[in-house]
Amino acid sequence: MLYKCKINITICYNDITFGGVVIDLRRAKILVTSFVCAIVAVGATSGNMYLALAGIVIGALFMALVRRRSAEVHIDERVEALGGRAARATFVIMSVFLGLLSLGFIFIGRNTGDGGLEALGTVFCYVVCLNCAVYSITFKYFDREHGGEY
Amino acid sequence: MTRQKARLKNLGFCVAGIGFLMLLFMFFVTASWIGYEVKEVCEEAMLKYEGDRVEALTKLLEDDAADFRARNSAAWALGQLGDRSALAAVKKSYKGYEKGTRCDRSAELCQYELYKAVKLLEGGMNISAFVWR
């Protein structure tokens, strides 16, 4: 059975408006980088670590907001498909690995009477269950997002 | 508009579902950890005192020479185990608890701990016990 999947390709807007002034995104990046460099330099020379950190955080925050506002989203179908497959493979590998690890820990813990190891195994078991449940929910969500009915 | 509403609803279900699962996960992990701690306290008590785990914990609780931290842990573990045969011993140590009073677990028998243990031993609900008992 085949299921159709919508793939949205968003057009890239390279300009952002900032206080009514249109700025090229590349220039905005340069501006923010210079700002962060200047703040970090001032912070480093004056021995104020917090100032340097604040500069970096503000710069990162600004860039994140600018990216969202400028809607600069280049969706490459190949990258999307590869990302999806890599994510699925990671999920399967980690689930199996943690599942086996948890079984091993519980088994060894019970045999040696090490309660800590057994508790760790139990927690890993819950992690695997949570992983599977979250996968199911997100799968359902994306399925509905892309028009699936089941 | 309806499409937008459907998408929002879908997102809401997804976020609520994942949030609920996270809470459930935290509950189960915490409950497992409580079980592990109870087991640890029981094993420590059984190394020093004779009898099964409840008897060993009761003896530890009543031992004036023992460390207060260990005795408080014994009271807590007895409450968690919920075995009514320990009720008399716990009640003997319980002098009364006033809400808001703080206790130093290393310097005295914590009355709040004993109060909780008495409540659990008298049949109070222990929501985490079914996970590890």
Image (cartoon, coloured by chain):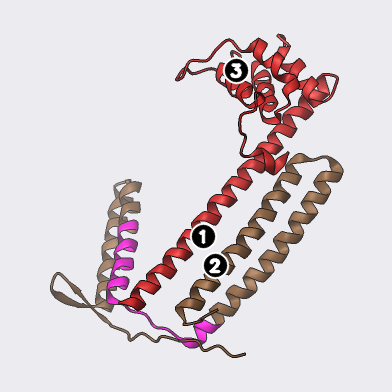
* Quadrant in the picture for residue B105: top right
| Chain to which the residue tagged by mark 3 belongs | B
> Along the horizontal axis of the image, is B14 left or right of B95?
left
Which chain appears red? B
Whether label 1 touches label 2, CB < 8 Å: yes
Q: Nearer the viewer, residue A44 or B14?
A: B14
Residue denoted by label 3 = B106
Check the picture and name the quadrant holding the C terminus of chain A: bottom right
At 59% from the left and 13% from the top, the residue drawn is: B108
Q: Are marks 3 and 2 on the same chain?
A: no
What residue span does the magenta drawing correspond to? A57-81
Query: Which tint was used for chain A?
Result: brown
**Spatial CA span between label 3 and label 2:** 47 Å
Pointer 1 local density, CA inside 10 Å: few below 14, some 14–19, many at least 20: some
Is B55 covered by the magenta stretch?
no
Residue denoted by label 2 = A137
**Which secondary structure is most common in the magenta stretch?**
helix
B127, above or below B90, in the image: below
Amino acid on which disc 2 is placed: Ile
Is A62 covered by the magenta stretch?
yes
Residue denoted by label 1 = B18
Label located before the other in sequence (1 or 3): 1
**Spatial CA span between label 1 and label 3:** 40 Å
